[in-house]
Image: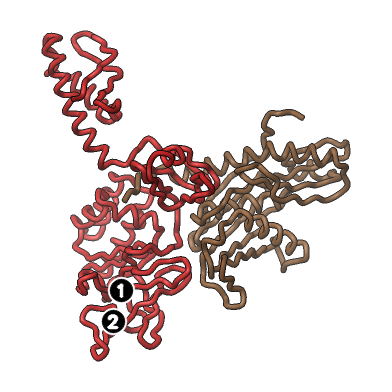
Chain colours: A red, B brown
Amino acid sequence: MSSLAIEPLLWQGNVFFCINFHISTNSHVFEIPPKQKQLFVKRCQSTQFHSTPTVFLSRLRRFVFSLVCFSFLFQEMEVDSMTETVVMPGDVISEAVELGKTKKLVLGPGLRRFNDLVVASKAGILRQKKNTFWIDYYQKRYTPVRGETVVGVVSGKSGDIFRIDIGTHDPANLSYLGFEGATKKNRPDVNIGDIVFAKLVVANKDLEPELVCVDSLGKKGKLGILTEGLVFSCSINLVRKISKENCPLISAMQNEIPFEIAIGMNGRLWIKAKTIRETIALGTAILASEKASDEDIKKICSTIGNKLFY
Amino acid sequence: MTKEVVILTRPLNFVNYLSRPDSSALLSQGETVALVAFFGPLEVKPQSLRIDRACFEVNFRPKTGIQTVKDRFKENSIKSICETALLSALYPRTSIKLTVLELENRGGFEACAINASCMALLVSGISMKYTVAAVHCIVDKKGEIVVDPNHRQAKDAIALFTFAFDSVDKNLVACNTEGKFNMAQYNDCQILAKSASEKVFQFYKEEIRKIHENDEIVGF
């Protein structure tokens, strides 16, 4: 099993301070993440540790072990925050090259292989999660990715195919059979100018993107034509931010106003609330949250809610 | 020659100023200012369609009036410099457009325009091989070399140089010269400009850091 090494321990008044400690398991040494370390120091300062040194040590041990268990869990879920470096096009990602020698690498957006090296091709922040590397970069123009859901505008009809503008250089194709329950006789009612919420099934730089409005079981789910509401564009980073699991924006807006939203990964959002006034207010809240922190987002939403109803 | 990094005398400033284009760069280098708007990848006209790469266009707009031959020359040099840096093979059958606007020319405009174009490309999130930094320098009447001169210093220049370097191997990408100079002066200028280009690369990186400063991790 794992062993615990705590060093050095300082005795200050009747409070233990732990400056630096690490846990070693059979295979590797594990450092406590800074957040947990802070928590630990806080716990040390609280009264429950202030007894005899032996009792303290046993409690400490138990506490640290619980932390470690948690930390391992966090490690699985959390993105490695150690690598938050800015990379520029042409930079060699030495961490990835090193890791690539022993493990299989997964290279995400912004990285490419060049001879035996891993080279950045975009300017942004390098992120790492286990053996997966990618770059977070600022982007406004959409490049299609297979499996992503997008909001598009029907820009043309030609025979069996609808042309959908999704913000890419080529309009995407949507077959009339891509709708739920559509047959040759029973054609869906789609007109030019309609808003469609669809999924990309073909996204390749050499091919036109292709959309469907059904899932693999032939059910439409949330996909399909969006009626009424308002569509507006924003940067792709904002879309990624608000579609994150722990982003407080959507829940904060829900507290103020009931609404429907379709988030297209192509930087287009469709919103529908009861009134136009509310819809526009929600749109403003979303656009304002691009550079805002979580607390600020909550503030923005509550001010907008207050302004609307008083 | 001295080995230490030559510091650009004029300060660099950057803003992503326009909201409509895919990205933009308002770059000032001292009193020289260029505004660049970037669009792409866009739909391509059939006559300029290329099956294996993106069609890259640069449109240079002078301060006043219509384009002259000199402007076309600048346009072409910006185009060829940016084209070497772009990975346009990743965007076949598209077009990529840069509009370069001359706002203020107080010496070294070409260098400023190249730097602004590169900054616009960086912010747009398009794939690139490397970044490019351009440095302007002169040889004055006394035969002294001034790196990144202002317009007062540049008034009595006998030779003007604009060098562009890439960020990976620090090789010379492009060079425009004007006036009378000898080989030794040219070599000196190139070495000084190369060391000054380091400053521009640092500036790029700092600006990208600023853009992402308040970012949280956008994972999957």
At label 2, which amino acid type do we have?
A: Leu
The one nearer the camera, A78 or B206, is: A78
Residue in the picture at 57% in, 41% down:
B203
Residue in the picture at 77% in, 38% down:
B146
SS of the residue under disc 2: helix
Q: Taking A305 as reference, is B163 left or right?
A: right
Residue in the picture at 51% in, 72% down:
B43
- Residue A120's place in the image compared with B75, above or below, is above
Residue density around tag 2, few if under 14, some if 14–19, many if 20 or more, within 10 Å: some
Provide residue B129's location: percent of width, then percent of height. 57, 51
Residue identified by numbered label 1: A212
Q: Taking A208 as reference, is A52 left or right?
A: left
Farthest residue in the bottom direction? A185
Provide residue B63's location: percent of width, then percent of height. 69, 61
Residue A228 visible in the snapshot: no
Residue identified by numbered label 2: A177
**Pointer 2 chain:** A
Place residue A148 in its image quadrant: bottom left
